[in-house]
Image (spheres, grey):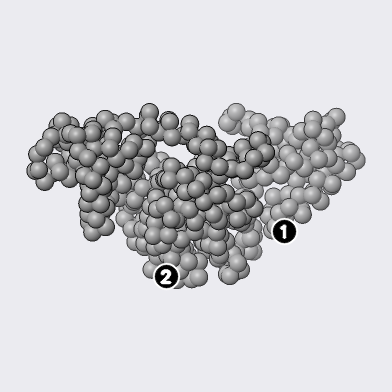
């Protein structure tokens, strides 16, 4: 066996005490008890782990904790290296050595034996494994501000949280643009389930992380164990499922996991930046299953909801802004709550830096770059061209006097998008559409909103155009 020095023992024992106080007991037992210290050379501690999959799991889920702990014990120059046991049954074990954050270039290792692989997904004799749910505890229903834009989604989320797997909302698919609260709501459901259903196993994963785990499981000949692990999760939250597109093997594996979970009454929550029917590169059998439960969208919040969200954030961080400043910020930051929070943080920093209260002048200074870039990058001409292309009409017809119904709808929709996606005045927008006045623009916006409220298919058309225009300026 490899000889372990007293120094490596001492340092690793201190690290273990810190780590044990930072994670759950089951996670500690699964991922840290099997680790053995090997030796200490200067400020570099080497530890031995059972296999490459084990190493990669640590690096994906605990690298921050490990780095902080090592630096605490060995100083800023402290580093951690791994030795991966290649064949634990051999009397002279081969090991592969890695530095933290430096995988072995994706190469295979000649000493690796698939049948010696210690599966990180299975703990013998335990069905409900106490896994780290990977939830952000700050995301709760209490701080998810409700408005007309998210009322249905929030209500469905609460119903699922109270009775996971026991409602018709399985799967629950939440979709919407970036920054509108999909991830917040998904985490809130998970946190609520953990609080009130302590026997339920909850797991949140991004689609990217899920895909990477599948790749590693395939490499380690452990796909059956991987699938069995996920099939025992009581509440599975998969974020950003649009990134499953064109990943046939991942879709196939997820299809089997989905079927098992659904058939056994386990809850599935999915988030996406678009509705299931608009997902491209996705197998039809998966899309059809996404529609089995409830699909609900998160819309851009109205002014009153944005102000409520901003005031809630202000209360939490203990600051107060004048009402005109709040209104100004919420009027100009419309479609992304994360950006609204970012502007709040920035104006708070400015006020502290310059030692003066926040006022409208400061608010204009903070958001000026954002407003300028939006106006320059997304032009009224671009909106007109995109709408004309969608309706297959000449763009000059949008500026003409014709009252033909298809052209009127396209013109009104162009005005609606111009008002929502740019900071141009109503007068400027009207002039771009054949010299019409601001009252015509307002009437057009109301007409489009009324049609969206009564025609679901038309509403989807508008949202798709908004999404395409937003993406075109990123």
On screen, residue 120 versus residue 278, left or right, reads: right
Residue 158 seen in the figure: yes
Residue 33 appears anywhere in the view: no
Give how far across and how far down residue 356 sits, in percent.
64, 40
Secondary element under disc 1, as helix, strand or loop, is helix
Q: Residue at x 76, y 53 (%)?
A: 20
Give me the residue at 45% from left, 43% from top. 333
Q: CA separation, marks 1 and 2?
A: 32 Å
Q: Quadrant of residue 50?
A: top right
Residue ID for mark 1: 25
Give the residue drawn at x 23%, y 45%: 439
Q: Residues within 10 Å of mark 2 (few under 14, many from 20)?
A: some
The image quadrant that residue 191 belongs to is bottom right
Residue 431, image quadrant? top left
Q: Is residue 13 above or below residue 2?
A: below
Vertical position of residue 359 compared to residue 372: above or below? below
Disc 2 element: loop
Q: Nearer the viewer, residue 194 or 427?
A: 427
Q: Quadrant of the N terminus?
A: top right
Quadrant in which the C terminus appears: top left
Viewer-side residue, 241 vs 320: 320
Q: Residue 340 got which mark?
A: none
| Residue at image mark 2 | 167
Q: Foreground residue, 191 or 151?
A: 151
Q: Position of residue 91 (x, y in %)?
A: 77, 39
Side of 276 where 44 appears, left or right: right
19 horizontally vs 197: left or right? right
x and y, in percent, of residue 358 in the image: 59, 43
Crowd band around label 1 with a 10 angstrom C-alpha radius: few (<14), some (14–19), many (20+): few
Sequence-wise, the earlier of marks 1 and 2 is 1
- The residue positioned 45% from the left and 69% from the top of the image is 159
């Amino acid at each position: 066996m490899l000889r372990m020095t007293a120094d490596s023992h001492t340092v690793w024992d201190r690290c273990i005490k810190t780590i044990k106080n930072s994670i759950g007991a089951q996670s500690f037992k699964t991922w840290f008890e099997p680790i053995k210290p090997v030796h200490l050379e200067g400020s570099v501690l080497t530890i031995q782990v059972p296999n490459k999959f084990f190493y990669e799991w640590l690096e994906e889920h605990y690298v921050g904790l490990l780095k902080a702990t090592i630096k605490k014990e060995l100083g800023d120059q402290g580093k951690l290296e791994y030795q991966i046991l290649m064949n634990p049954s051999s009397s002279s074990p081969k090991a592969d050595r890695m530095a933290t954050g430096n995988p072995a270039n994706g190469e295979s290792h000649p000493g690796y034996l698939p049948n010696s692989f210690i599966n990180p997904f299975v703990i013998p004799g335990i069905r409900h494994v106490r896994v780290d749910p990977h939830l952000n505890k700050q995301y709760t229903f209490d701080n998810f501000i409700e408005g007309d834009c998210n009322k249905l989604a929030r209500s469905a989320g609460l119903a699922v949280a109270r009775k996971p797997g026991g409602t018709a909302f399985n799967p629950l698919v939440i979709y919407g643009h970036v920054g509108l609260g999909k991830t917040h709501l998904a985490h809130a459901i998970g946190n609520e389930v953990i609080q009130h259903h302590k026997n339920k196993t909850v797991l949140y994963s991004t689609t990217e992380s899920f895909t990477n785990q599948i790749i590693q499981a395939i490499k380690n000949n452990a796909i059956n164990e991987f699938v069995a692990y996920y099939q025992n999760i009581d509440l599975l939250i998969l974020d950003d499922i649009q990134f499953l597109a064109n990943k046939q093997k991942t879709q196939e594996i997820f299809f089997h996991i989905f079927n098992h979970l659904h058939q056994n009454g386990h809850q599935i929550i999915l988030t996406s930046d678009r509705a299931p029917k608009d997902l491209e590169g996705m197998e039809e059998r998966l899309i059809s299953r996404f529609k089995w439960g409830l699909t609900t969208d998160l819309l851009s919040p109205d002014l009153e909801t944005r102000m409520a969200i901003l005031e809630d954030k202000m209360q939490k961080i203990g600051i107060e802004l004048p009402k005109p400043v709040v209104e100004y910020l919420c009027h100009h930051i419309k479609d992304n709550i994360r950006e609204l929070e970012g502007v709040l943080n920035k104006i708070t920093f400015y006020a502290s830096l310059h030692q003066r209260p926040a006022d409208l002048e400061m608010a204009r200074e903070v958001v000026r770059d954002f407003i300028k870039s939006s106006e320059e990058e997304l032009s009224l001409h671009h909106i007109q061209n995109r709408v004309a292309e969608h309706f297959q009409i000449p763009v000059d017809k949008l500026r003409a006097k014709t009252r033909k119904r298809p052209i009127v709808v396209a013109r009104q929709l162009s005005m609606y998008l111009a008002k929502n996606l740019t900071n141009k005045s109503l007068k400027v927008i009207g002039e771009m559409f054949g010299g019409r006045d601001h009252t015509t623009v307002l009437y057009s916006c109301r007409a489009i909103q009324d049609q969206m409220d009564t025609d679901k298919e038309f509403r989807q058309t508008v949202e798709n155009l908004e999404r395409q225009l937003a993406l075109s300026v990123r």
